[in-house]
Amino acid sequence: MIILERVSKVYPHREEPALKGVNLQVGPGEFVYLTGPSGAGKTTLLRLLYGAELPSKGRVVVGGTDLGRLAPRHLPLLRRRLGLVFQDFRLMPRRSVYENVALSLEVAGTDRRIVERRVEEVLEQVKLSGLAKVPADTLSGGEQQRVALARALAPGPDLILADEPTGNLDPENALAMMRLLVGDYVGGATVLVATHDPTLLSLVRGGRVVHLERGRLEEAS
Amino acid sequence: MNRRGVVGRALRQMGEDLWLQGVAISTLAVALAIMGAYLALCLNLNQAAGRLLTGPTLLVVTDPQVRPEEGRELAAELSRLPGVASAAYVDQQEAMIRFRRQLGPQADLLDDLETNPLPNAVELVLTPDLAAPPELAAHIKNMAGVSDVVTGRPWLQRLERALRAGGELAVALGVLLFLAVVLVTSNTVRLAVHVRRRELELMALVGAGGGYMRGPFLVEAVLQGLAAAALASLMLWGLFSLLAAPDALPWGLRLGQILAFPPLLPAALGCLAVVSGLMGGFLGVGRSLHPREVL
């Protein structure tokens, strides 16, 4: 599902590369924790995977697509196969929960009746069924993150990328979020969760752990 | 792309920021009003010039002994000549009445005249494509009952040349004004894109294509343009009604003719608004919706 070959990323005006010769392979359906302290390069690695950045060196392949060779106009097609979850939720604050979740389907031109049915399904999965009409900015942090997850799950993605998904949540909501990510709801998708919080690993066991330290990747046991 | 969806999203995003809409529409209305005023002036001046150029350009003075019936027969004969668009017999009384009308408030200067010095004449309107007016004038001068032929053609030809040069300048100025309107539109769209930056980046992250993101901005620019065109038309109509006094100008023109509100102006401004909205929309959105440029 994911192949990174000798990937380096250097940002302008920064002496230290954000990533140095990173090699990583993640198979379909795998659950992977990407750990490391703040500034280790986790977010950069995720940005490379969803095509917000191009590597300075090396090759990034997602779902068989070499992102270095992908024309920008084809990038939306790749992103429709991904589910993205961020620490800051990235919701449209004045829009309803329904509209936020439906967005990931509407951008792909999905029929309105299918959108309605699918949004209802995923809101049920994340236990927000009764809040479909509520504006997103009136929800608690935990609820907002579940809306973001519902939006990521709605198109039935092949790969879910979560960047510090529990960073703004209390332990109870963090556990609930992680259970959703490893549950049946992801429909066999590959899941890559970036976190700087080692306690998160103890919340949900069984995932593969890879560790980033100052831009270098090492596999943890 | 679902067209109803695009229009709906455009209307929705317009409704979410009414202040921005007010600023955008009023700015565009001013730009379109300037453009509209310019168009109206050009059109009215062009029509006025047309009236001058197609006016009686040849005056055939009849012999004093030619009776009115013979004068009218001469007019009929002259109207059949190649190069003559129309011919009308004007006796000296009618010529005096016209002269008085042209003099307006100064007409009482004519009261001291003991006799009417104006001759009986036939007024000829020549076709614009007439190649050799001097030959025509010479031919008419030799006809029976003709005393003299007075031609204003050389002066009119100079005026025509000047108007043609002025027309080219007017087109160039018009293009510049249109580009200014497009620039105003594109800046307005750029402002709208900036305001919705985060939302657009979010759309890009979940796989929205350029068309999905760009569509509502183009529709918004066109709708703003149409609203601004209506506002500009109203402003111009009011302004022209206010300024168009019945004052006389040189060459028999009237201020009311120059500052007349052309009935097709709102439609012309609407078309301009649509075209400038689409052009300005494309320019304004530009590269700001590049899928790689996300948070």
Image (cartoon, coloured by chain):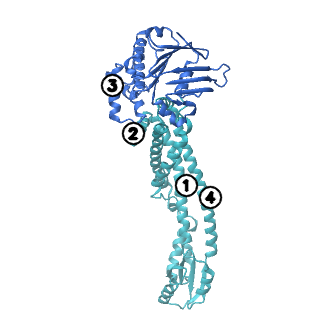
Labels 1 and 2 share a subunit: yes
Which quadrant: the N terminus of chain B? top left
Residue B112, quarter of picture: bottom right
Give the distance between the C-alpha atoms of the residues marked 1 and 4, in whole angstroms. Answer: 12 Å
User: Which residue is disc 4 drawn over?
Assistant: B169
State which mark lies toward you, 3 or 4.
Answer: 3
- In the image, B242 versus B134, the foreground residue is B134
Give me the chain letter of mark 4. Answer: B
Chain B colour is cyan
Give the distance between the C-alpha atoms of the residues marked 3 and 4, in whole angstroms. Answer: 65 Å
- Mark 2 Cα-neighbour bin, 10 Å: few <14, some 14–19, many ≥20: some
> Percent from the top left, x then y, of residue B17?
45, 34
Under tag 2, what secondary structure? Answer: helix
Give the distance between the C-alpha atoms of the residues marked 4 and 2, in whole angstroms. Answer: 44 Å
User: Which residue is disc 1 drawn over?
Assistant: B38
Give the distance between the C-alpha atoms of the residues marked 1 and 2, in whole angstroms. Answer: 37 Å
Amino acid type for the residue under numbered disc 1: Tyr
Give the distance between the C-alpha atoms of the residues marked 2 and 3, in whole angstroms. Answer: 23 Å
User: Which residue is disc 3 drawn over?
Assistant: A121
Q: Output the letter for the chain in blue.
A: A
Please report contact status of discs 1 and 3: CB closer than 8 Å, yes or no. no
Q: Indicate which disc, 4 or 2, sits on the residue closer to the N terminus.
A: 2
State which mark lies toward you, 4 or 2.
Answer: 2
